[in-house]
Amino acid sequence: MRFTKVFIVLATFALAACACLAAAGVMATGVERTTEIEVRTALDTQGNDWAEVQADGLRVILTGTAPTEARRFQAISRAGQIVDAARVIDQTDVAPTQDIAPPRFSAEILRNESGLSVSGLIPTSTDRAALIERLEKIAAPGQVSDLLQTANHPVPEGWDAAIDFTITALRDLPRSKISVDAGRIEITAIAASREEKAKMERALNRAVPEGLKMALQVSAPRPVITPFTLRYIIDDTGGRFDACSADTEQARARILAAAAGAGGQAGAQCRIGLGVPSPAWAEAVAQALAALRDLGAGSVTFADADVTLVAAETVSTEAFDRVVGELEAALPPVFSLHPVLTRPAEAGTDGPPEFTATLSPEGLVQLRGRLSDDNLQMMADAYARARFGASAVHSAARTADNLPSDWPVRVLAGLEALSQLSNGAVTVKPDELTLHGTATREDAQADIAGLLAKRLGEAETFDLSIAYKAPPLPQADIVTPEMCEAEIAEVQRTSGKITFEPGSATIAAESLDTMNAIAEILDICGDIRVEIQGHTDSQGRESMNQQLSQDRAQSVLNELRARRILTASYTARGYGEANPIATNKTEDGREANRRIEFRLIRPQTTPERTSTLDAVAQQLQSDSTDDAAASDDAPETGSEDEATEGAASE
């Protein structure tokens, strides 16, 4: 009986203990699940859904792969706010960072009278010393400023070819800037004249190697006009310029507006150049043209700061004095006015003496009229022979007395002016010099006006009537590259396109006449940059079509070479089936897509980009800034362990 009571008591305690253990297990599991849910919800709300949460008793274990170290620290800090940070067990990883993109290798070379400077970022494997030595052979030892930086990355394709061609081009470009990239260069240069500009462009387009893209811009500077000349005349036919010069577009617009107000003809030209004697040039010209308009007839001539106003004999003395007085008060400082009122010749005289020189279209020159003495006769004859050729001059001039003291100056100035024409005549009188004829330069009349104003001096009058006649151009200069491209397309449209034997790069026999016609056009076109493009339909494998189109384009290039066409500036490129012009679902469409095209190469200038080691530094700094920004978003914690983690992440 006693044993039974003891057993019952022990059994009761055992059952109570089991019940307690079961209750404790249920409570612990509930706490773990609640902790997991709270921590996971907090992390998901923060955007850290990459983290996995597992509660093990009082511990919270974080697993998963964080995109960055900053996001990893952010998740650990957030979990430490939900539970005690000491209970957070970090078992997370960080995704490996992407390799930094290689920097853009580029160099910029400037050349002028003081030497060369080269800057930019080049591969470490480039022989820097050899490069500077090659540049010093162009400039001079000690005249090359080396501002290059290097980076240890592989040399990009096309880099060496671009550097080699840059060195070649620099030899003929004394004032230039060349930007070098892998497979591409951009050249900006200054030529001394339009003729030199054309020569530079032809030479560079011919020399650029195949596969290297070139953006070329050559400019000729504004001419230096000396003396800075302007001459405007009002007579029975209206107002006109013999010469017009301006220093800016705004000055030219103001001068032409003033000329229009003085009765000038529409379409007047005024060249822009350097050498203006005063910034107030346009203001002074406008004042002088207004004064000439008030006089009604005469001329005004500017030679630098000297202004000669000549009134016709029909102008009254009263009107002349009034206009001259107003103009003298209105002219800006620096300008000096020399007024002249023409008087009619006295009745009963035989007329003034004169000297005449004529230049025929064939280049023959005849000298007639009066010369002051034997010395002038010898000088005029020798000067004409030197200017026009000894066998082209015939002199019938004679000596006479009582000629003006400046007669030799006027005769020689007239001959010099006549030499600027292709044909014409000059007449020299004591109070007038008249030149008329044709010239093959558009600026000839303005240049001659400046010449006579300088040679004859102040208060001297001259009359110019010079017509411009464009010189004949070679056939190659008449045909533009755009015209060549259009004519070749027209030949293929009318005579038949270039076709090939089936499945091969052999040009079909029936297309040889088309090749001959295209070769004749390209022979006339001269040095143009052309890409011969091969295209196929979509039948067959893409890689086979690509290779077939390349082989066919090369075959056309070889045929042109066989016809002795200069193809140094031509390239052959296959595009495969990438650029159809019709559907590939029909036979007609596929036939249209199988074609050869001739396209002008027009490289586009790319925007400037950072080309030094700063580019690499900026990218690293940008990545660090992004990580730091993410770290700043993480809430602060009071745990010493968390502070240590934060310092490590930074």
Image (tube, rainbow, N blue to C red):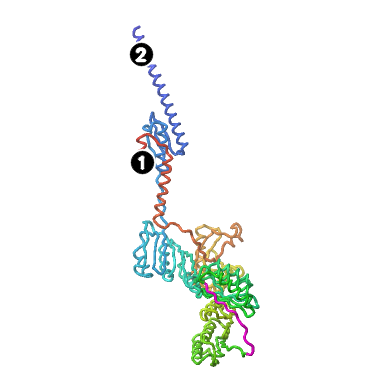
- Nearer the observer: mark 2 or 1; the answer is 1
Instruction: Please tell me whether mark 1 sits on a helix, a strand or a loop.
Output: helix
Q: Residues within 10 Å of mark 2 (few under 14, many from 20)?
A: few
Left or right of 36? Residue 340 is right
Does residue 342 show up magenta in the picture?
yes
Q: Residues within 10 Å of mark 1 (few under 14, many from 20)?
A: few
| Residue 432 against residue 601 in the figure, above or below | below
Instruction: Please tell me whether mark 2 sits on a helix, a strand or a loop.
Output: helix
Q: Residue furthest top?
A: 1
> Can you identify the residue that label 2 sits on?
10
- Decide which of 184, 556 is in the foreground and name it: 184
Quarter of the image with the N terminus in it: top left
Quarter of the image with the C terminus in it: top left
Disc sitting over residue 647 in the figure: 1
Residue 512 visible in the shown view = no
Q: Amino acid at mark 2?
A: Leu
Q: Position of residue 481 (x, y in %)?
A: 55, 69
Q: Residue at x 42, y 41 (%)?
A: 632
Whether residues under marks 2 and 1 lie with C-beta atoms below 8 angstroms apart, the answer is no
Q: Position of residue 401 (x, y in %)?
A: 54, 92
Give the residues in magenta.
335-348
